[in-house]
Amino acid sequence: MATANDRAVLQTIFNPSTPFGDIPGLDEEEEEEEDAQEEGGAFAPEVLEQVRDLELQGVSAAESGDVSAALERFGEAIRLLPERASAYNNRAQALRLRGDVAGALRDLEAAIRLSRGRGRAACQSFVQRGLIHRLQARDEDARRDLERAARLGSAFARRQLALLNPYSALCNQMLSEMLGRLRNPGGPGSE
């Protein structure tokens, strides 16, 4: 079973700009509820354990720079439990690392659909899809996904939303300039 630390490592690998502690949905009650749904639901416990192990192997492979091996492990996990959202989200990150944005978007769509837009996998999928939309200059789509991720508990998504807000960006720039003048009263920009 993946521990909170394992999920933190996964988050750090696939979202390097996210602070280590910002693990969307890492709320113990929500986590226990998701685990209970997976274990008591349609997933056989021994298969679920095998899939989680494959995902951790995929994370380790990605961490060591072997994206091909990571994709293989995530693919195996999906073949074993095609109804589980987490492996699609993880594979999407590896696909994105490889430069396959279209493939990543397909997997993110699957993760969101399978998670019914709730829980850790959905939150991470909304963040990743929002970032892809942002890179594609599709700011409204990015904003919509990041808002959904923020509602699911992602502080990273909230910060990204602030960056998408032109008034917020302007205020941040002005505040930064003011703080610079306070720190260096005789420097450039002071009058």
Image (cartoon, grey):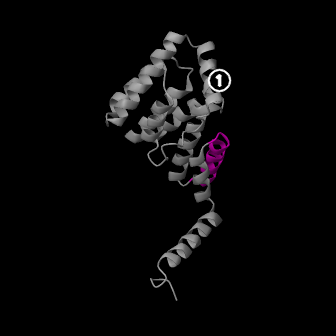
Would you identify the image quadrant in which residue 57 lies?
Answer: top left
Number of marks present in the image shown = 1
Residue at the outermost bottom position: 191
Could you say whether the residue bearing mark 1 is in a helix, strand or loop?
A: helix
Q: Position of residue 139 (x, y in %)?
A: 60, 54
- Name the one closer to the observer, 151 or 128: 151
- Name the one closer to the observer, 143 or 9: 9
Asked if the magenta segment contains residue 19, the reply would be no
Left or right, 72 with respect to 123, comes to: left
Would you identify the image quadrant in which residue 72 lies?
Answer: top left
Left or right, 82 with respect to 58, comes to: right
Write the residue at 36% across / 34% down.
Answer: 62
Decide if residue 180 is in sight here.
Answer: yes
- Name the one closer to the observer, 123 or 22: 22
Residue at the outermost right position: 151
Q: Which residues are magenta?
A: 138-153
Within-10-Å neighbours for mark 1: few <14, some 14–19, many 20+: few
Residue 37 lies, with reference to residue 104, above or below; the image says above
Residue under numbered circle 1: 33
Q: Position of residue 175 (x, y in %)?
A: 58, 71
- Name the one closer to the observer, 105 or 54: 54
Would you identify the image quadrant in which residue 50 lies?
Answer: top left
Q: Position of residue 140 (x, y in %)?
A: 63, 52
Decide if residue 80 is in sight here.
Answer: no
Residue 34 lies, with reference to residue 167, above or below; the image says above
Write the residue at 46% across / 49% down.
Answer: 17
Q: Position of residue 21 (x, y in %)?
A: 51, 42
Residue 111 lies, with reference to residue 177, above or below; the image says above
Asked if the magenta segment contains residue 145, the reply would be yes
For the stretch drawn in magenta, the main secondary structure is helix
